[in-house]
Structure formats: C-alpha cells, structure tokens
Amino acid sequence: MKVKHYWASVLLLLAGLLATYTLVQYSNNRDLNRVSQSVAVDIELYGGYLTAETQRALTLLHTLASFFSVSEVDHATFDLVGADALANYKHLQSLFWIPKVLAEDREGYERIAQNIYPGYEFKIRDEHGVLVTEQTQDYYYPIYYQNSRNSRAGLGLNLAEGLLGRELDRIRDQGPGTFSVDIKPIFGDPLYDEEDAKNYLMVMMPVYTGSPTNIEAYHRAFKGFLIGAIRIDSLIFDYLNFERYTQLEISVSDITSPERTVYIALNEPEKGGNLLEEYSARIETVIAGDRRWLIEGMPTDKYIGLVSTGQGSYIAFIGMMITLAISFYIYLLRVRAEHVEDEVKARTRELSFVNRKLEHLTRTDALTQLANRRYFDEYLEKEWLRGRRDKTVLSLIICDVDYFKKYNDSYGHIAGDKCLQQIAIALKSAFSRSVDLVARYGGEEFAVILPGSVVEDAGVMERAAKAIAELQIAHNQSTVSEYVTMSFGACVVNPSNDIAIVDFIKHADQALYLAKEEGRNCGRVVNLVDENNE
C-alpha cells in the first residue's frame, strides 16, 4: 500500500510539474507575443503622430500663404505674422519670403532692403561655400525677409540656381494650392551646420494675387514664395519622452526617392538594456507632401519587463504547491488575455482618433472651420452622382461678401478674418440640415450645397441674408448698407448626363454676378429644372 501511495504521489507530482511547466511556457509565449504587438502598436502610434504634426505644419503654412495672397508682404507684416507662427508652432525653425526679382529691378530691391538690413545684397555661394555677390542674371529668387529662431545669415541668398531654382519654377507654374516638400539643409546659415541635425523639412509654397486659372495668369499674379523650415530633430524627438519609448531604438528614414535613402534620426534606448532584434517592427508612413518615411523600432530586454505580465514564476510556485492552482491560473490567463485585448483596442482607438483628426485637418478651412474647397469638390461630385441615380433635385449657392476688399482696407486684415469667421457661423446656422454643406469657396466667397432642395429667390437665401444682417458688422465703406452684406447666386438642377458639374457651378456663378450687377445685397437663381421641363 505504501508503494502504491508512493507511486501515486510521484505520478501526481510529475503530472503537476508537467502541467506547471506547460502553463509557464504558455504564459511566457503570451508575454513575448504581447511584446511584439506592443512594439508594433507603439511604432504605429508614432507614425500617426509624425503624420499629424507634419500635416499641422502644412495647414499653418497654407493659412499664411492665403493671408499673404490678399495682403501686402512688407517687412513689418512679415515679421508680425512670422513671429506669431514661430510662437504657435514650436517645430517651425524659420520662415522665408522669396520674391521674383528681374535683373532691371535688382538695384531697387537691394536699396529698399538695405534700409532694414544694412549691407543687404543678392548673394550666391562660390565653389568653397562662401557667400559672394551674385552676378547679373535674368531673374533672382532672393531671401528677402526672414524670421528665424537663431539668425538671419541667409538673407539675400539667390535660390533661383540649380535644382532648387528649377523646383521653384515648377511649382510656380502649377498655380494656387500647390506646394513642394523636400529635405534640405537650412539656406546658407553656417550656424546650423554646427548642429547635430542638419536636415530640415522645407515646405515651399507659391503665393499669387487673386485666383489665376492658367499659366499666363499664374505668371502675372505671382507674388513670391513662402518657405517654412521645420526642425526634423524637434519633430522626431518631441514624442519620445514616454517610459516605454526610452527602451526602444527607433530609427526614421526618408525613402521617398528610390535612388536615395536619407537617414533622418536615431533614438537610442537608455543604457543597460540589450536589443532584441527578433521583436522589432517597421512601418511606412506618408507625411505632408507625399514624402514616405520608414520607421523601425527595436525593443530592449527592459522593454519586455515594462509590457509583460511576469506571471511565469508565480504560476510555477503555485503549480508545485497545489494542483488546484492550475484552475486558478487558467482563470488568470483569461483575465490577462482580456486585458491585452482591451489594451490593443485602446491603442487602435487612439490611432483611429489620430487618423480622424488628420482627415478633419485635410477637409477643413483653417480660418473659418468650414469645409475647404477640396472637400466641397468631393461632396458636390458625390451628391451629383446621387441626384443623377435617384433623379432628385440639387441646388448650389455661391455667395460673396459685398465690398470685402474695402472692408479689409478700412478695418485691417485681422478684422477681416474675424468678419469671415462670424459669417461662417451665421451661414452654418442658416443651412442646418444634416445633408447641407457650407464651405469656404475661396477668399471672401462661400458655397452651399443643398441636396434635395429647390432654392427660390426669396427663400433660403433670404434666411441666410437675414442671418448675416443680424450680425450687424459695421462696414462704413459699403454703398449698399452700413453693415456687412452678401450677394447670392444659385442654380437648381436635376443632375443628368446632359449637363456637367462645371456648367452647374458656372450657372451659380453667373447668378451671383447678376446679383452684384443689380445692386448687391440680394440673390438671383438660375432654375435649370424649369428649363428642362419646358
């Protein structure tokens, strides 16, 4: 009997040890899998942050370019706007204004600039990298104004030479809304060459007066280039101050060009940890200007300690002490599995939030918080196809602030921006259906898409005009009212193959022109539904 009890005890002990060993191995594998998932999620979140931050910089520069398109770019205005931009976006290093100067105008430009910057002249780098006086050229792209956190050593540098000059010419000929993003050293400033990070994201935007529509008009309306230099090292390392990121080796590379990979930054983990290559993760993310960045992350053994459960030894102790602990361990595993799934879902929600925020930035006008022109075009095309399929009516209103240029000249552009913001709120309240879309069409123009609605002369446009009037924004330069007013032009149509979207917009624009011709502060409608029925 004792022998039987002995063997039974041994068998039970062996069974318990085997079960404990199996469960310990299972727990360790779960922890290691969780490490791989956590590294992937951390790298994905980091990529989302870089995308959102570069898009934020692009939105800021678009706003400044829009401001300069309707404003004189003098030194005082540029300094004021540039200082505000540097204060509100910490990754922005420098802001440049680059006009196009013909050879015959060079002396006048240099003389005016010398009143602000003594010794100013157009310069070029010689073969030794030294700034020297630029020779006579057909035209120049000089750094004319500069607002920077460090210095102004690049003033006067002519950017019309070489690859950069050709790139500036290319985007100039593309018209409003275009831009170029590249990784370049800062322009001609030797102080930056002494820093660890020599590369900057250079966002280059052409600025035009009005809304030119072809290449000849682009050249006539061209004012200059607005260029922003964004510190890549600030952008890269600002997000990496959380505890887990201190135990990750993160490298960022620009792989936009198939012929050249640019290694941008390397975040080394804290000392004392051994890198575990088998748990590394990598993603490609697209930042502003369609530049592709490769982000690679590799954890240390300390990172495993931050994300793992550490239950293996505990399970082993309980397993050797009592067989019933196996059931309890299974329960703990299930709880832990649910916890891991919840955390992965939370990380996914965070990433989804970043993506939604980015989508909102790309669809929203920065000044008025209405839909921007890009989203307006997308929504109009969608509703046009819906109306053609369902044979429903579609209305479009284009409205324009009366004498807005005179308003800006009288009250200033800051007051003009505030005026546009108040009008945007009023229009949103006037067109409040969930399917209605109010968008900023350009400058002081707004547009409203009304699916399934027929616009009449005295209907929704009158409601919108009343909402504007109730704002009682004083306008002493208006000849139609003592307050700010708007003119409206609308078109109503049943979408079909017989008419194109561009003609639909033209009819609404012609109605707006007619309203202005008839005295402004009124609305006119082109009803193509009635014409088709006839």
Image: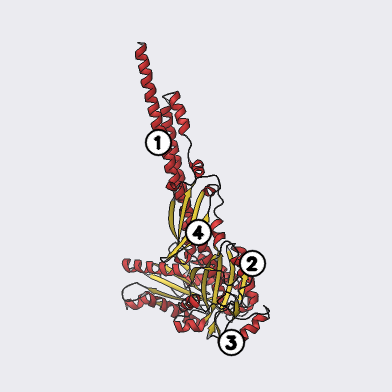
Q: Distance from label 4 to label 2 (Cα)? A: 24 Å
Relative height, residue 372 to residue 173 (above, below): above
Q: Which quadrant of the rendered structure holds the C terminus? A: bottom left
The amino acid beneath tag 2 is: Asn
Q: Distance from label 1 to label 4 (Cα)? A: 36 Å
The amino acid beneath tag 3 is: Asp
Disc 3 target residue: 105
Among numbered discs 3 and 4, the one appearing first in the sequence? 4
Q: Are marks 1 and 3 in contact (CB under 8 Å)?
A: no
Residue 44, disc: none
The amino acid beneath tag 1 is: Tyr
Q: Nearer the viewer, residue 164 or 108?
A: 164
Disc 2 target residue: 150
Residue 375 % position (x, y): 44, 67
Q: Distance from label 2 to label 1 (Cα)? A: 56 Å
Residue in the picture at 47% in, 47% down:
346
Q: Nearer the viewer, residue 441 or 21?
A: 21
Q: Nearer the viewer, mark 4 or mark 2?
A: 2
